[in-house]
């Protein structure tokens, strides 16, 4: 407990020091027409997430060296991208290298080649999707806390990950929430925060599936997954460049077009994922998801619900003012 308190203190001091540095060197986010914010805000406060993992690495016997190396690699390129936008090709190469280090750490290279291809595609897609979803206050820390809570609970039974690392990341997310989960955020996660957290969560998911042999746990990422996939599909149908910034995600429609408070929208997404997590964990523990047909059925139902909600939101947006 004392070590947790000490690490918490270190993280608080670290983020306050970062604010001073960011303010001095103008590491800020200036709003534009695609932004969901209207004020200049410090960017990169999510650096607290990889820092939390590094503190775990230092204080807990330097375990999982290759995974931490991958995290530092992807965090470094993401922070550089926060300072000055980099080529998408450069980012993709580094993401591939970081995921490779993670796979090596987890012994994934012993699997068949097609599982490796699927693993790379899912991991790199998830990292970028999580980054794209980081567009309003509170959504990254709230969603991360739900994911971390699910992994913490499952780890009590499956023992697939370091419980200490999960708890330290929870602490970092709570600290970040204090500065971000408000009407006018004091800091944004930046690519360094969202990409690093996505990498850490993909590490936990990979380890969980590897140890439990239940690929169905991927539904713990269902909310972000569905919003990302369908948003890409809709943008392709509109012949838009999917690599350009936009305001087409459901959370963006709610916060920008419907003018819902950011924290409220973030809560919608986090609580929805929490409900899905509870249902998925219950079904797997009860043995109700042994057939892949059940998994596909759940995906179809969740997709239908998402599409209906998106349809209703679009109707409200197009409805003329009275």
Image (cartoon, rainbow, N blue to C red):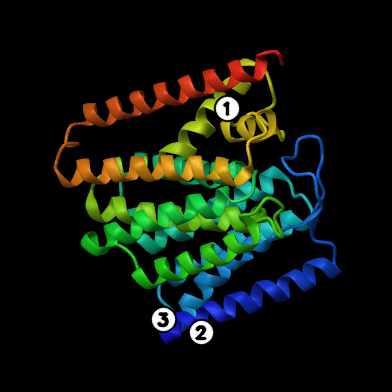
Q: Nearer the viewer, residue 99 or 40?
A: 40
Q: Where is residue 25 in the image (x, y as percent from the top left)?
A: 85, 67
Checking the image for residue 6, the label placed there is 2
Q: Name the residue under label 3.
A: 60
Q: Is mark 3 on a helix, strand or loop?
A: loop
Residue at 69% of width from left, 33% of height from top? 256
Choose mark 3 or mark 2, whichever is in front.
Answer: 2
| Comes first in the chain, label 1 or label 3 | 3
Checking the image for residue 232, the label placed there is 1
Residues under labels 3 and 2: Cα distance? 14 Å
Residue at 56% of width from left, 51% of height from top? 140
In this orientation, does residue 111 appear? yes
Checking the image for residue 108, the label placed there is none
Question: From this viewpoint, which residue is outermost toward the front?
Answer: 322
Q: Is mark 1 on a helix, strand or loop?
A: helix
Q: What element carries label 2?
A: helix
Q: Position of residue 230 (x, y in %)?
A: 52, 26
- Residue 298, by quadrant, is top left
């Amino acid at each position: 407990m004392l070590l947790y308190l000490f690490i918490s203190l270190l993280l608080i001091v670290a983020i306050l020091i970062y604010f001073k540095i960011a303010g001095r060197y103008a590491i800020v986010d200036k709003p534009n027409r695609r932004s969901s914010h209207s004020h200049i805000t410090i960017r990169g406060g999510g650096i607290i997430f990889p820092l939390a993992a590094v503190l775990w690495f230092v204080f807990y016997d330097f375990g999982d060296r290759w995974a931490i190396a991958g995290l530092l690699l992807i965090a470094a390129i993401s922070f550089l991208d926060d300072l000055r936008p980099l080529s998408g090709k450069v980012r993709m190469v580094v993401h591939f290298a970081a995921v490779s280090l993670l796979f090596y750490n987890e012994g994934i290279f012993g699997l068949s080649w097609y599982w490796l291809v699927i693993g790379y595609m899912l991991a790199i897609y998830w990292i970028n999707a999580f980054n794209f979803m980081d567009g309003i206050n509170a959504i990254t820390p709230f969603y991360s806390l739900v994911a971390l809570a699910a992994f913490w609970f499952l780890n009590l039974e499956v023992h697939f990950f370091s419980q200490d690392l999960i708890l330290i990341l929870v602490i970092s997310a709570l600290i970040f929430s204090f500065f971000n989960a408000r009407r006018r955020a004091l800091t944004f996660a930046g690519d360094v925060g969202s990409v690093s957290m996505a990498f850490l969560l993909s590490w936990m998911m990979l380890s969980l599936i590897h140890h439990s042999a239940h690929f169905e746990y991927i539904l713990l990422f269902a909310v972000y997954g569905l919003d990302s996939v369908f948003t890409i599909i809709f943008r392709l149908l509109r012949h838009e460049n999917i690599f350009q910034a936009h305001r087409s995600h459901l959370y963006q429609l709610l916060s920008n077009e419907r003018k819902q408070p950011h924290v409220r929208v973030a809560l919608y997404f986090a609580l929805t994922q929490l409900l899905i997590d509870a249902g998925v964990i219950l079904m797997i523990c009860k043995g109700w998801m042994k057939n892949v047909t059940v998994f596909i059925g759940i995906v179809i139902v969740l997709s239908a619900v998402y599409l209906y909600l998106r349809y209703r939101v679009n109707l409200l947006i197009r409805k003329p003012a009275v």
